[in-house]
Image: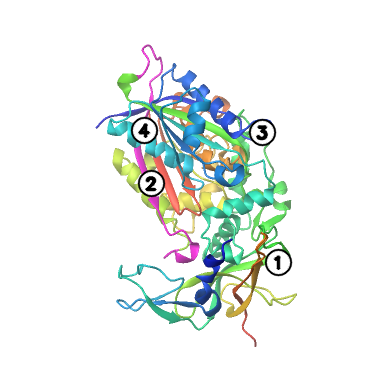
């Protein structure tokens, strides 16, 4: 996949930078061009804390191309403490760690995939891990 | 307003057609539909296809399919809406005939899935999942359905075997469909033993990908060939609605809002309520879709859709038959062609040509296809 496409997403993937709507002050992640809550133009950056909880999850036993090395892996919908929900892999799960809805999780930066094409780009971005007790 | 009627239908068996190419599958369905329509010649072809550009390296199917099937020189174009591509193409054909600009249109749904490995196919299907923020986490279409199911089980009281009924029913209904991929019923024990694909979904919660092509010819009543014996099936309601592409952007994850609105609008167009139909051909790509679609259409309250699966209510002789020729689970899931298969099968029922699966006296059908996790929903009401 093309380099600019990944480069464009660096703030979101590395810093969890979304938006705060200047009109209705809803926090948005991922960023949107138009605020889904009030219809105003959304363009003010907002950095999320990276704290959240599991809203739903699944453990996948067959991985798509580029993700084989992680299989089986667990993907979750994570509800951020500021409100939005995002999709991310869960990581650093212990062997007997039971994932459950409502479990507190926090953002970490990890390698997401290795692109299989000739460019050999390593894609990094956010995953979430259980909050350390 | 002009009436739009279905003049002809055609389909190929759904399955792995290693010896047949995409264009030949399409041509077979087209020829069958044209023969069924008494030779009526279409002026426009609307193609439902999702993955030819990825799996076959082929776009511009309008030119390919028309010229390969003896219709060179007519209008021809592909309509893409992921798994709902065929149904979206049907809607475009309906609008074209309704507008009066096209007298007779042919809809062709065609998909060739089995030339690649199942892993490459699942990866290709991720095109209907949001690339920047869902795919980056390794999320597939199947995993999306699993996320819906897990949350559903958390919010509502879904029993252990609450999803199994939908899979068992689809397989039972496919037994007597000669074009179905799987023609053997499965037992609850077989369902329970199946391996996990994406927790909590097992193999029997997921419809199998397959090759296939189906075609439908639409026209105005006055243009039907003279002497056509049977009363034609009419298209009386049509709606296409979208929702957010990514699941994480939904206001209510379990609502299938696009499915709800498209049912509402298609029914309102013809002045009926969903409860006035004789069967509901829904989109059971995953068992959870069947359940959420029944709730979205208003046949059950949120959290209670699984109760409809009990006591034979959804069987062919029940109150509200679904997946009447096997659904996606039993007939198979020829991705972008699926929406056209659903229409063809509904027409078979309304004409009284459904054989062992015939619902006595079926006069009105609700037919719905979904693209992605109901990010696109296309609903039609057909009537005789």
Left or right: B289 with respect to B377? right
Cα gap from disc 3 to disc 2, whole angstroms? 31 Å
Range of residues picked out in magenta: B224-252
Q: What chain letter is assigned to the residue under label 3?
A: B
> Is residue B322 something that shows in the picture?
no
Task: Note whether B285 is above or below A84 in the view shown.
Answer: above
Residue behind mark 4:
B235
Circles 3 and 2 in contact, beta carbons < 8 Å: no
Q: Secondary structure at mark 1?
A: helix
Task: Note whether B296 is above or below A77 in the view shown.
Answer: above
Q: What chain letter is assigned to the residue under label 1?
A: A
Report the residue at 35% width, 69% height from top: A35
Residue behind mark 2:
B240
Report the residue at 48% width, 26% height from top: B9
Decide which of B17, B383 is in the foreground and name it: B17
Q: Position of residue B50 (x, y in %)?
A: 52, 44
Report the residue at 67% width, 38% height from top: B185
Task: Note whether B331 is above or below B196 in the view shown.
Answer: above
* Nearer the camera: disc 2 or disc 4: 2
Q: Earlier in the sequence, mark 3 or mark 2?
A: 3
Residue B17 got which mark?
3
Q: Position of residue B255 (x, y in %)?
A: 44, 58
Left or right: B6 with respect to B149? left
In the image, is residue B245 part of the stretch drawn in magenta? yes
Q: Secondary structure at mark 4?
A: strand
Residue A70 got which mark?
1
User: Which quadrant of the figure contains the N terminus of chain B?
Assistant: top left
Q: Earlier in the sequence, mark 3 or mark 4?
A: 3
In the image, is residue B309 part of the stretch drawn in magenta? no
């Amino acid at each position: 996949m093309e380099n600019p496409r990944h480069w464009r997403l660096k703030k979101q993937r590395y810093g969890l930078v979304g938006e705060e709507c200047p009109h209705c002050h809803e926090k948005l992640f991922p960023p949107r061009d138009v605020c889904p809550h009030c219809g105003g133009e959304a363009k003010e950056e907002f950095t999320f804390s990276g704290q959240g909880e599991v809203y739903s999850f699944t453990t996948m036993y067959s991985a798509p191309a580029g993700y084989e090395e992680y299989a089986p892996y667990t993907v979750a919908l994570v509800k951020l403490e500021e409100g939005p929900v995002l999709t991310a892999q869960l990581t650093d799960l212990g062997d007997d760690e039971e994932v459950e809805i409502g479990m507190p999780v926090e953002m970490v930066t990890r390698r997401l995939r290795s692109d299989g094409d000739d460019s050999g780009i390593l894609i990094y971005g956010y995953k979430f891990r259980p909050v350390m007790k | 307003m002009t009436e739009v009627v279905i003049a002809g239908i055609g389909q190929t068996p759904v399955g792995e057609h290693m010896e047949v190419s995409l264009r030949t599958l399409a041509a077979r369905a087209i020829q069958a539909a044209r023969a069924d329509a008494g030779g009526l010649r279409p002026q426009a072809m609307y193609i439902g296809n999702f993955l030819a550009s990825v799996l076959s390296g082929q776009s511009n199917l309008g030119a390919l399919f028309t010229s390969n099937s003896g219709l060179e020189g007519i209008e021809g174009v592909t309509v893409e809406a992921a798994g709902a591509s065929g149904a979206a193409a049907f809607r475009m054909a309906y609008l074209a005939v309704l507008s009066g600009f096209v007298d007779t249109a042919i809809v062709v749904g065609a998909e060739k899935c089995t030339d690649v490995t199942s892993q490459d196919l699942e990866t290709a299907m991720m095109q209907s999942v949001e690339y920047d923020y869902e795919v980056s986490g390794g999320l597939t279409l199947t995993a999306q359905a699993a996320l819906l199911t897990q949350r559903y089980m958390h919010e509502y009281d879904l029993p252990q075997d609450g999803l199994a009924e939908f899979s068992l029913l689809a397989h039972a209904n496919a037994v007597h469909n000669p074009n179905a991929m799987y023609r053997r019923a499965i037992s609850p024990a077989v369902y329970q033993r199946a391996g996990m694909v994406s927790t909590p979904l097992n193999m029997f919660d997921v419809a199998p990908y397959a090759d296939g092509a189906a075609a439908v010819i639409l026209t105005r009543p006055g243009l039907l060939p003279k002497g056509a014996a049977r009363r034609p099936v009419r298209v009386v309601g049509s709606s296409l609605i979208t929702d957010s592409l990514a699941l994480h952007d939904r206001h209510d994850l379990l609502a299938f809002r696009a499915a709800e609105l498209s049912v509402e609008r298609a029914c309102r167009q013809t002045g009926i309520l969903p409860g006035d139909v004789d069967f509901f051909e829904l989109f059971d790509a995953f068992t959870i879709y069947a359940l959420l679609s029944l709730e979205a259409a208003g046949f059950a309250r949120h959290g209670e859709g699984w109760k409809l699966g009990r006591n034979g209510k959804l069987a062919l002789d029940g109150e509200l038959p679904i997946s009447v020729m096997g659904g996606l689970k039993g007939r198979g899931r020829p991705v972008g062609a699926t929406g056209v298969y659903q229409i063809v099968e509904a027409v078979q029922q309304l004409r009284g040509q459904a054989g062992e699966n015939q619902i006595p006296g079926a006069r009105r059908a609700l037919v719905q296809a979904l693209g992605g996790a109901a990010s696109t929903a296309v609903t039609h009401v057909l009537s005789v």
